[in-house]
Amino acid sequence: MAKRKKTRQIHIGNIPIGGGSPIVVQSMLKTNPENLDETLKQTLDLKKAGCELVRIALPYEDTCKIIPFLKKEVDIPLIGDIHFNYKIAIKAMEAGIDAIRINPGTINNIHKVKEIVHVAIQTRTPIRIGINVGSLEKRILKNHQHPNADAMVESALYYIKMIEDMGWQELKVSLKASDVLQTISAYDKFSKKSDYPLHVGITEAGPIFSGSIKSAIGIGILLYKGIGDTIRVSLTGDPVYEVMAGYHILRDLGIRRVGVNIISCPTCGRCRTKLMDIVEEFEKEVAYLDVNLNVAIMGCEVNGPGEAKEADIGIAFGQDKAILFAKGKIVKAGIPKEMAQDTLKEEIYNLIS
């Protein structure tokens, strides 16, 4: 793996971004921001899952009323996502948002972008310059035959220069496409020309299964090349899965060994339990645990301890009973199947307490 590229450091709330600080996992709320209760619940779910930054869409100026409410109820930095109407960005910053994300292509007016920057300087609000290949400015596209990585890089560098000339450098940048190779190319080219911190992701990656694969390839390759300071796995589904996928990518690359690593068999004809349902439920329940632990959930008590002998703790199901094992050694046998998950969770809590 390449050495991580050294970037400038900014802070979003109390979270350092870049400058050698840990790569940050973030997600985005999927609820209607006008529904305060649903939005609060999803924010709390994300925080429980380990999400470190939460982005919220702000479609209207009036939506900004949710900002002080969320900041009072949940201790997690909020990033306002703004398109089209520059006045929403201004109102969000005045309401105390921790950072904003703007897409210059959808605002599509240099003077309005400058208005946003003036207020950012006054409120000391970091800005993410979020470039998307599908919404590049017409001015940029005149220099290219079609939207591509070079066009994204040109757009990002243009706005960085403009904002720097205004006296503001609390910036991070993203250059996203739904095409994996195009995204990798854009980040690779940009990272050779700038040292601003990078938010990495594949935009509109798709549903949970295929989107996670696409994101793991794109984000994983960039991180392997040493590129990236924050990541978001963009999925059509529960944002908790975005956080879980993000940590899996970091852990499997050996970048941040945090969280429960579940080892589970693919199942076969020997399996006599609904292992897929058990594993999915269990993963969501333990995703928030801030530990480095290998936990096995196996569908066969004959091969379970052997195939997962490196697990710190695990269970293997038989016909009617389950066994509990640790480092390949059976710790307890004859556990009723309906009690197996609770037994495993109890042992995990004993290990980390």
Image: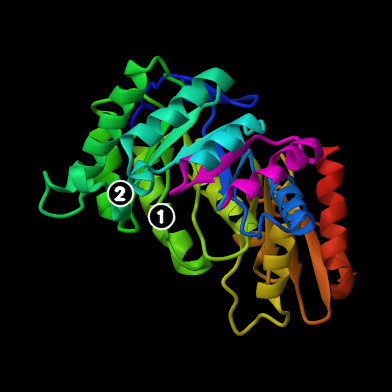
Q: At x 47% / y 21%, what residue is drawn?
A: 20
Instruction: Kindly indicate the quadrant of the structure image that contains residue 194.
Output: top left
Residue 181, horizontal then vertical, whole percent:
26, 53
Q: At x 75% / y 59%, what residue is drawn?
A: 38
Residue 256 lies, with reference to residue 237, above or below; the image says above
Residue 13, horizontal then vertical, whole percent:
63, 27
For the magenta stretch, what is the residue range? 60-86
Residue 244 magenta: no
Instruction: Tell me the crowding category of disc 2: few under 14, some 14 to 19, or many 20 or more residues within 10 angstroms, Cα based.
Output: many
Instruction: Tell me the crowding category of disc 1: few under 14, some 14 to 19, or many 20 or more residues within 10 angstroms, Cα based.
Output: many
Residue 135, horizontal then vertical, whole percent:
31, 52
The residue pinned by badge 2 equals 183
Q: At x 74% / y 42%, what residue is drawn?
A: 70
Residue 334 lies, with reference to residue 226, above or below; the image says below
- The answer to the question of whether label 2 and label 1 lie on touching residues, with beta carbons closer than 8 A, is yes
Residue 64 magenta: yes
Q: At x 65% / y 44%, what residue is drawn?
A: 64
Viewer-side residue, 200 vs 145: 145
Residue 257 shows up from this direction:
no
Residue type marked 1: Thr
Q: Secondary structure at mark 1?
A: loop
> Which numbered disc, 2 or 1, marks the residue that appears first in the sequence?
2
Residue 311 shows up from this direction:
yes
The residue pinned by badge 1 equals 203
Residue 116, horizontal then vertical, whole percent:
46, 31
